[in-house]
Amino acid sequence: MSALAAWRLAKPFLPYIAAFLALLGAYLWIDHRGYQRGFHARDAEIAAAQAAAAKQEAENAEKARKAADDYATKVAAMQPIVIRSIDKVKEYAQTPAGRAECLSAERVSSILQDRAALASASAGSGRPVQAGIDPAAQPDQR
């Protein structure tokens, strides 16, 4: 088939082919505009989500700062109580009653040795020994 024969065959259909191509072009142009609208809408949603995340992060940072300040205030308010308590213990340890209760390390170790000796002595008698109580002063529990 020659080019002239193909032209004569396609000539009656040229208006239809042109209309089809025009419709196809319009569809593609509209579809591209829709794509661009969707693309810009997606960008706007991303920007809104980032702004919301930044706002939430700022609120959380403010809450954390406020909580840290509140904690620091409470600790600062408790500090004089702790210092007064330490001072009371030191003052009490200097009184005769406090000296008896606030024992030195040597006294504590000797008490532990005495308790161990009492425990070994009472093991043969079958009577339980309570801490700090003389086994001879305990009533017979049999």
Image: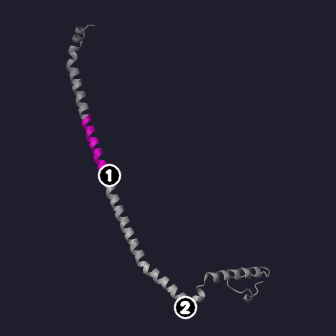
Above or below, 50 relative to 113: above
Q: Residue at position x 33%, y 62% from top?
A: 59
- Can you tell which quarter of the image residue 11 is in? top left
The residue nearer to you, when weighing 33 against 89, is 89
Q: Secondary structure at mark 1?
A: helix
Q: How far from the left and from the top, in percent, is residue 130?
A: 69, 82
Q: How far from the left and from the top, in percent, is residue 118?
A: 73, 82
Q: Is residue 75 visible?
A: yes
Residue 40 sits inside the magenta stretch: yes
What residue is shown with label 1?
50
The residue nearer to you, when weighing 36 against 81, is 81
What residue is shown with label 2?
95
Q: Residue at position x 21%, y 22% from top?
A: 18
Is residue 130 toward the left or the right of residue 39 in the image? right
Above or below, 63 relative to 102: above
Q: CA distance from mark 1 to mark 2?
A: 67 Å
The residue nearer to you, when weighing 139 against 78, is 78
Is residue 91 toward the left or the right of residue 27 in the image? right
Q: Residue at position x 57%, y 92% from top?
A: 96
Select label 1 or label 2 by which is in front: 2
Q: Which residues are magenta?
A: 31-47
Is residue 95 toward the left or the right of residue 67 in the image? right
Amino acid carrying mark 1 in the image: Gln
Above or below, 121 relative to 44: below
